[in-house]
Image (cartoon, helix red, strand yellow):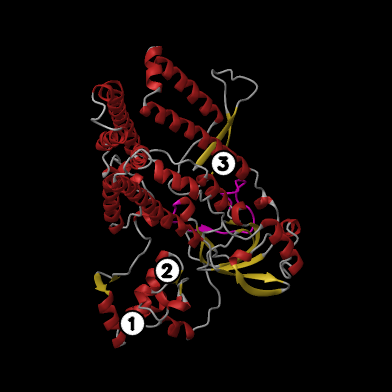
Amino acid sequence: MEIQIADEPETPSIYGPVARVERKLTVEYRTLSIQLSRHGQHQSRQQQSRLSRRSGPEWWNRLCRVLPLRKAYDQRQADHAEQEAHLEATADELSSLKFHLDSVDETLTKFGTSRIQGLENEAIKRRRERDGPNVLSSPPNRILLKIFQWLFSGFCPLLWIAAVFVWISWKPLGNPANPQYLALGIAILLVIALQASFSAWQEWTTSRVMASITGMLPTETVVTRNGAMSTIVAVDLVQGDVVHVRGGDKIPADLRLIEASRDLRFDRSMLTGESDAVVATVNYTDENYLETRNIAVMGTHVTQGSGVGVVIGTGDSTVMGRIAKMTASKRTEMTLLQIEIRRFVIVVASLSLVAGTTLLIMWAAWLRKSFPTFLTLSDVLVNTTGVIVAFVPDGLPICLTLTLTLIAKRMQRQNVLVKNLTTVETLGSVNVICSDKTGTLTQNLMTVVHAGFLDAAVTTDELKTRYASGQHTAVQRLYDTAALCNGSTFDSESLHLPIADRRVNGDATDTAILRFAEHLRPVNQAQSEYRKLFEIPFNSKN
């Protein structure tokens, strides 16, 4: 995401329009690309105002304001303006972060910590009470509002009116009370409960997907406290903690690096969508907080190397926390299908109420006087209820939910995770999807299939046979290179699994070569025969 904040200068340009001075803040994370400009926002509002004045005569504009589609469009425009304001506020917050510009000594002094000693227990207690646990705040549940929406959305208000008419027709208006009216009232309430249960089920499936964000934080991390290294739960981290990271770790909080090996790299694909690992440094490389390489952002992975960092942000004060807070504040927009359904509901509800009201007026003005014994008041209310309910397509919400669910299930079988059922309909209107390939459409996994010797291509199975025979020097040298000159390692907790299923700490290229070497012979046996003297990191310069 690229946020541009433009400021107007005091003096105009001699070459034409007034020049703009822009300070650009780049916020990179997947699925969002927005440009904000105070100047651009002002121009867009002026253009919208001109378009609204040219849209038609005044009587037509007033008529459009009462139509559901126009109201939904105006609401969407208001939501966009509010979201832009949140983005601008987030941009100002991120632009004010200057931790990366401080030197190592200034960082340690600012947070009152030491590289050797770390924090003491008293300081840890005070900071935990001040900042709280290192977790992302959950969005408000608002369960009462959700229950109200489940029970009174769509055609449910009409059904509630019908249920009230039937119940008062049974008692106290019924004399004697008709048990059929009681059965009809219970049936209407069951229909309302069934529709509400389907809406609740849809909400529950959505919440299960959103709950997966809790897996972004690691469970444990290594810190230096009271002069000793220890493993603690990541939730207990506080500002000023000295954290040790190595290849395969997930960053538990925002860190200012104070030590970094030459091969320390971070995978920021979850934020930027870019598969290339970022080389870490101790000194800042960019004045932009999100572009510099001496900051490790919470939730990113360490692909290789090792380093030490000071916690500068926990929980909601991290970059990930600010982004989560910004996205949580965004109101859910109505899709085109929801707008059309709401318009359909309003039209049908209006017709049903008009028909029911007409029936009551006819009974009160004519039938009650001309034929006083034909229909009682309770019978008229029940007949009016029948007219109202007859207009209501009771199965419409259920059919829509089931149809969208079936489509979502089909997409899930194709490894496409649908966060909300209402987005399924929007995907049907998409013509072109622009996406980063590596790590998004693919899994960023590589496999060695063939090896080339001069003009001959040999499969991995043939290589294993030739290596076992011990008569092919070229195959032996190939194995030594793949096993020894490799920056990846197998996770010790997954060594009992098949080679293809083991977790590997390292980049995709080294991972593929490591699995290939393990297929020929266990790598740890080859590495135990040699002693590493020094290491040259694999990069474009070397």
Q: Position of residue 404 (x, y in %)?
A: 29, 48
User: Would you say 217 lies left or right of 466 here?
Assistant: right
Which three-letter amino acid code belongs to the residue tagged 2? Asp
* Nearer-N-terminus badge (1/2): 1
Residue designated by label 1: 473
Residue 429, disc? none
Measured in 3D between alpha carbons, the distance from the residue under mark 1 to the one under mark 3, in whole angstroms, is 55 Å
Of 300 and 16, which appears nearest the observer? 300
User: Would you say 122 lies left or right of 274 here?
Assistant: right
**Other residues around mark 2 within 10 Å, as few (<14) / some (14–19) / many (≥20):** many
Residue 510, disc? 2
Residue designated by label 3: 25
Q: Range of the magenta residues? A: 273-292
Q: Is residue 194 visible?
A: yes
Residue 17 to residue 396: above or below: above
Residue placed at 37% from the left, 21% from the top?
A: 64
Measured in 3D between alpha carbons, the distance from the residue under mark 1 to the one under mark 2, in whole angstroms, is 23 Å
Which three-letter amino acid code belongs to the residue tagged 3? Leu
